[in-house]
Amino acid sequence: MIERLCIIGIGLIGGSVALAARAQGLCREIVAADREEEALRQAEKRGIIDRGYRDIGKAAEEADAVVIATPVGRMAAVFEALKPVWSPRAFYTDVGSTKASVVQAVESVFGRVPENFVPAHPISGRELSGVAAALPDLFAGKKVILTPLPHTDVHVLERVRAFWQGLGAEVHDMSVAHHDHVLAATSHLPHVIAYCLTHLLGRKDEKDEIFQYAAGGFRDFSRIAGSCPVMWADICLANRDEILKLLRQFEGELQRFDELLSRGDRQAIHDYFAEARAARQRFLDRHS
């Protein structure tokens, strides 16, 4: 049983961690730190947390579990605030969508990654943001990737694993570099493409009423372009090299299809679509 759980950043993910931890009876007390007074007030009013603080150090003092749920661009500042109250008896984890940048942030403050910090990334979310969008079952049946370092305390690692499993998640281990490579392809690039297409059509809509005739397919595809711009700007910059590699590959795919369409090769277009459809079906068969 966790006596005091501290969540830094009480938005969608942080709020959902608190709701799930309370629902599953994982802790006696939940406190949070956030720069936004209104977010803390909402969280207290909904009973998501017991107390809220603007000061990270005060919130984390005497906590035996700390979850950092801020945008990855703020991680260094969070670690700076935590350093004076960092406790060897507590475990620390995060929810950042990039891991190399988080490791670099903690190293910039401590000189090395503390043995009781386990980087993590829950593969779950919504296009909505803020504590009002938090859900107690957001992690149920979803994957959480842990990226422990070679010197991570194995007992702490198991405590963090048990914590995420207690929230309902399926926990996997991965190296930091492999995580950022995989997530660039499966999450970061799709978000960039959705933002780019929606941005393009948004400009056209000013004179062509494009969105007036958009059907469900566009709504489904563009859904992730409704995600928090602050968070995704941070993610793209934090994982820039991996995303840039994939963007170059995607440009090649667009050029390939451009050539097929330009020469009017119906069979080649059909085969291209069929290959993509088969790849999607293999994914569904493997992960349904």
Image (spheres, grey):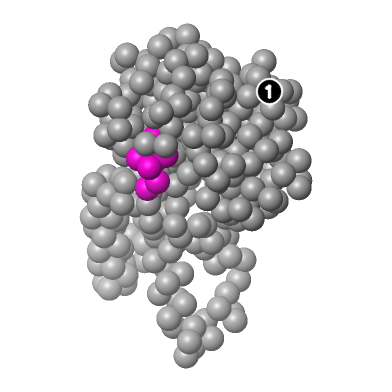
Along the line of sight, which residue is nearer the eye, 14 or 269?
Answer: 14
The quadrant in which residue 100 appears is top left
On the image, numbered disc 1 is attached to which residue? 27
Residue 31 coordinates in the image, percent (x, y)? 63, 34
Is residue 203 something that shows in the picture? yes
Residue 16 lies, with reference to residue 252, above or below; the image says above
The residue depicted at 53 percent of the width and 30 percent of the height is: 60
The residue depicted at 26 percent of the width and 72 percent of the height is: 263
The residue depicted at 65 percent of the width and 19 percent of the height is: 3
The question of residue 77 being in magenta is answered with: yes
Residue 134 lies, with reference to residue 273, above or below; the image says above
Screen quadrant of the N terminus: top right
What is the magenta range? 73-79
Q: Secondary structure at mark 1?
A: strand
Residue 58 lies, with reference to residue 161, above or below; the image says below
Tag 1: amino acid: Cys
Is residue 145 something that shows in the picture? no
The residue depicted at 25 percent of the width and 52 percent of the height is: 244
